[in-house]
Image: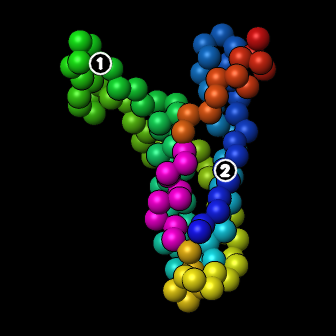
Amino acid sequence: MPLETHGVEVEVDKETGQVKILKYIAAHDVGKAINPMLLEGQVYGGATMGIGYALTERLILKEGKVMNSNFLDYKMLTAKDVPNIEPIVIETNDPFGPFGAKGIGEPGSVRRRPPSPMPFTTQSG
């Protein structure tokens, strides 16, 4: 089973509530990294999905109808919006995985969710 943890350092504009990610670190225990470049790509993609979900994406419903059903109205991150993501690859030997590897396809994005607003409220007043 792959293990992972992600952490961010953010800056919050107290006037607007705008959140800017200053640093993003993503550590993954992947067993044996068979294809390190592909593995890092999965981490970047999953982290980017989570950042978009947390900071920009918002599905608007009105009487059960989707009001922002196209990419003009549904705000997603673009390449210029993505902060620097630092992947940390931790290699171990998984006796049950092929060649000692663990899966990395889903873990990069499956557990990403918006952070609790509590830290932002506590720090920004």
Q: Which mark is residue 2?
A: none
The amino acid at mark 2 is His
Measuring from the top left, give residue 51's x and y in whole percent: 53, 40
Q: Is residue 7 in sight in this rendering?
A: yes
Residue 115 lies in what quarter of the image?
Answer: top right
Q: Residue furthest front?
A: 96
Measuring from the top left, give residue 28's x and y in whole percent: 65, 64
The one nearer the camera, 97 or 48, is 97
Upstream in sequence: badge 1 or badge 2: 2
Measuring from the top left, give residue 27's x and y in whole percent: 68, 60
Question: Image height check: is 82 above or below 76?
Answer: below
Magenta region includes residue 15 = no
Residue 17 lies in what quarter of the image?
Answer: top right
Measuring from the top left, give residue 15's x and y in whole percent: 66, 10
Q: Which mark is residue 6?
A: 2
- The residue where tag 1 is placed is 61
- Image: magenta residue range: 103-112
The residue at 66%/68% (across/down) is: 29
Question: Image height check: is 5 above or below 41?
Answer: above
Q: Is residue 86 in sight in this rendering?
A: no
The residue at 63%/81% (across/down) is: 94
